[in-house]
Image: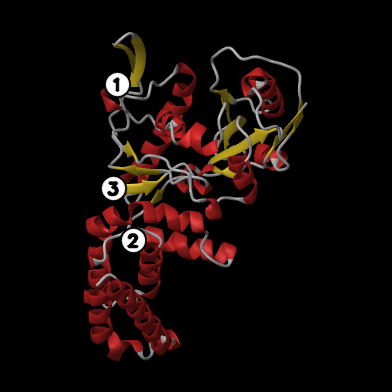
């Protein structure tokens, strides 16, 4: 029998990975085991990093990579391999269901991410195999925070874990038992990854090792070569308006257009971002006569992919109208593009107004 793996994909292209709150600089990197009913659960002491993870959700099918769409729409049962471009990690997981019902509806990826980032939640037990890496990652995030006042880990809402990579396996059968091959898959990837002296294997349970032929991800060599290549400073991304817009522009340059997964990640939390800081940031740009066309484009693009309340569009348009009035004299010679930028802002106002009118 064959098990066919997809390529490795960034986990953030499948689900928003977002935290809320400031990281706790005083966690002692210790865990304690307590009794919860008839079960023993392990939690990070003093609530760990003290951030909250937004529940992970699988992006809509049109946002997912084609291979991942096929996995989700295929038969029941899958095996997945989780690793990282910044850290030499290996975790192999299984599900008897498909991607949506087996990993997202039941919150399994939320549990994984809480363990990786030392995030306390009463439903998540931080099993031993995940703790070493969680401590290492936490210390890196604290070091970044202490050396950079604008670090993403200081932000109220951040995207995290852009280093995480995942691949899925299926065999084309309508139903099969992935648990029979979990250990075989683990051994295969361990043999591929063990050249790295600091490899951390997060599996600790017993695994079955039935014989099977494994067709590896086509980009596995690229992933192995990338171990440790991604600087921890590049892993977490603040979602304050300046950081978010800069990443929006960067992704547009790389891809020709901004990937839908990034827009849908922001759409997941735009209500919080707008009310917490984005609206104030846009209003400050009006007062300081800062060019805001890229910022405004990002905000409206994200809003149109969300279910934000109609009041947003009225507020958004009023800010841009005020900006257009106050800046018109000064924009005519702005880098030779003043007229074009004002025209762009006018188009954004018109789109926003039209959306607002459709609700009334």
- Identify the mark at residue 156; answer none if there is no mark: 3
**Number of numbered discs:** 3
Nearer to me, 350 or 319: 350
Dot 3: what SS? Answer: loop
Mark 1 and mark 2: Cα distance apart in space: 33 Å
Q: Is residue 229 visible?
A: no
Q: Residue furthest front?
A: 174
Check the image and report above or below for 38 versus 211. Answer: above
Residue, x 72% and y 16% (percent of image)?
210
Does the CB distance between marks 1 and 3 fall below 8 Å? Answer: no
Q: Which residue is mark 1?
A: 45
Q: Which element type, helix, strand or loop, lies under badge 1?
A: helix
Q: Residue 150 appears at what percent x and percent y?
A: 33, 52
- Residue 212 falls in which quadrant of the image? top right
Q: Is residue 182 visible?
A: yes
Q: Which mark is residue 241?
A: 2
């Amino acid at each position: 029998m064959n098990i066919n793996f997809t390529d490795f994909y960034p986990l953030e292209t499948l689900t928003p990975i977002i935290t809320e709150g400031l990281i706790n600089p005083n966690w002692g990197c210790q865990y304690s085991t307590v009794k919860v009913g008839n079960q023993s659960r392990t939690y990070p002491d003093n609530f760990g990093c003290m951030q909250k993870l937004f529940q992970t959700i699988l992006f809509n099918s049109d946002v997912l990579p084609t291979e991942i769409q096929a996995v989700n729409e295929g038969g029941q049962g899958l095996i997945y391999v989780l690793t990282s471009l910044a850290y030499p990690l290996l975790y192999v997981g299984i599900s008897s269901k498909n991607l949506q019902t087996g990993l997202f509806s039941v919150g399994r990826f939320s549990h994984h991410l809480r363990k990786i980032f030392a995030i306390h939640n009463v439903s998540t037990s931080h099993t031993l195999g995940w703790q070493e890496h969680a401590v290492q990652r936490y210390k890196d995030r604290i070091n970044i925070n202490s050396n950079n006042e604008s670090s993403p880990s200081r932000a109220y809402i951040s995207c995290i874990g852009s280093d995480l990579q995942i691949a899925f396996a299926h065999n084309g059968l309508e139903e099969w038992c992935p648990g029979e091959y979990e250990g075989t898959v683990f051994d295969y990837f361990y043999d591929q990854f063990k050249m790295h002296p600091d490899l951390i294997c997060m599996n600790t349970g017993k695994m079955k090792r039935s014989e099977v032929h494994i067709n590896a991800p086509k980009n596995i060599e690229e992933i192995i070569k990338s171990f440790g290549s991604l600087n921890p400073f590049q892993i977490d991304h603040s979602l304050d308006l300046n950081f978010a817009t800069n990443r929006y522009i960067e992704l547009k340059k790389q891809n020709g257009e901004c990937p839908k997964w990034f827009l849908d990640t922001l759409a997941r939390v735009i209500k919080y971002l707008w009310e917490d800081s984005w609206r104030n940031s846009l209003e400050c740009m009006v007062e300081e006569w800062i060019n805001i066309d890229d910022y405004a484009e990002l905000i409206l693009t994200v809003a149109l992919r969300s279910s934000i309340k109609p009041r947003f569009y009225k507020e958004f348009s009023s800010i841009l109208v005020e900006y257009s009035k106050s800046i018109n004299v000064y924009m005519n010679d702005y880098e030779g593009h003043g007229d074009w930028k004002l025209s762009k802002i006018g188009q954004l106002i018109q789109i926003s107004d039209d959306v607002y009118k459709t609700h009334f």
